[in-house]
Amino acid sequence: MNQPQPGSQTAPLSAEVARPVFIECDNLVKIYKVADLEVVALQGLDLLVREGEMMALVGPSGSGKSTLMNILGGLDFPTAGRVRVGDYNLLELTRRDQVRYRRFMVGFVWQQTARNLLPYLTALENVELPMALAGLPARERRARAADLLERVGLADRMKHRPDRLSGGEQQRVAIAVAMANRPRLLLADEPTGEVDNQSAEQIFHTLRALNADFNVTIIIVTHDMTVSTRVDRVVGMRDGRTSTEILRRREGDIAVHEEEYAILDRAGRLQLPEAYIEALDLEDRVRLHLYEDHIGVWPEHAHRNGDREGQE
Ligand code: ADP
């Protein structure tokens, strides 16, 4: 990774901190009940996302990514904990607030292209539909839909139905649909999962441009490491919790510096990366020592007498 040059124009990582917190998940728990079984999909998840961030959520299958996205999208409710998006407390949404939240606050792009678009409507009509449901006058919605389709690079495909568009183009129409009512949050669940590399690149560029133009906060669930290297922040999930974070500083589309962090939750718990646990054969208990400016962690039986004081 290139190191930033002296005098370069990039903002320091700490500039992120100045933006207001937009999403706040605090000890979020989601339990699914299936017959007599309980599945704990989220077990005390903590996450802060700042206004205008573009972040990726990664993690093994079953780690709770979709569950979190569904909760943030107002499609499902948590079992316990706290979750706030803007002024909405998602634990206490009235039916009316839920409709308003889903219509104006959040847009969704799904992996399955067919789920995003109505097959018998043109691209333009698909983008207009959410605005029609929101009661926007016809002229205004036509103009806004055309503008959005231009922004996603499909000015010449407006009159096409989905079956005449490539998978990547359909996903870009879906992004325009998701942005139709100017949401403050855009959620994309594996948006590049079913398209080739070049289309994935275009989808990524489109999301980045919308993020810059509208300051819309974007969360992308992805396995695609090329996408996750091109967002501001990658949050790793494991067992229903956030476990690691990579923060990036960028110049335009190019990441110029990155740092990896583990997440310390409010109860003081820290999840060590699997690779570290394996490298030192850590099990059950570890020894901790507090130094002036850092903490050392040792396998339980190693160096009991502080014979490595000052090292780790
Ligand atoms: P990911 O998106 O990371 O693959 P999910 O959020 O889909 O993870 O799933 C997390 C856990 O919750 C898994 O164990 C999954 O089987 C379970 N789960 C997800 N949705 C449901 C559901 N509707 N009913 C029962 N269990 C579910």
Image (tube, rainbow, N blue to C red):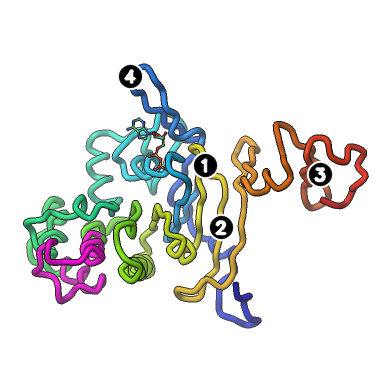
Would residue 68 be found to the left or right of residue 302 on screen?
left
User: What residue range appears in magenta?
Assistant: 145-174
Mark 1 and mark 4 in contact? Answer it, CB < 8 Å: no
Alpha carbon of mark 3 to alpha carbon of mark 2: how far? 24 Å
Closest to the camera, between mark 3 and mark 1, is 1
Mark 3 or 4, closer to the camera = 4
Q: Is residue 156 magenta?
A: yes
Q: Residues under labels 2 and 4: Cα distance?
A: 39 Å
How crowded is the residue under tag 2: few (<14 C-alpha within 10 Å), some, or many (20+)? some
Amino acid type of the residue tagged 1 in the rendering: Arg
| Residue at mark 1 | 238
Which residue in the structure is indicated by mark 2?
246
Q: Earlier in the sequence, mark 1 or mark 2?
A: 1
Residues at marks 3 and 1 touching, judged by CB atoms closer than 8 Å: no
Question: SS class of the residue under badge 4?
Answer: loop
From the image, give the main secondary structure of the stretch colored magenta.
helix
Residue, x 56% and y 58% (percent of image)? Answer: 246
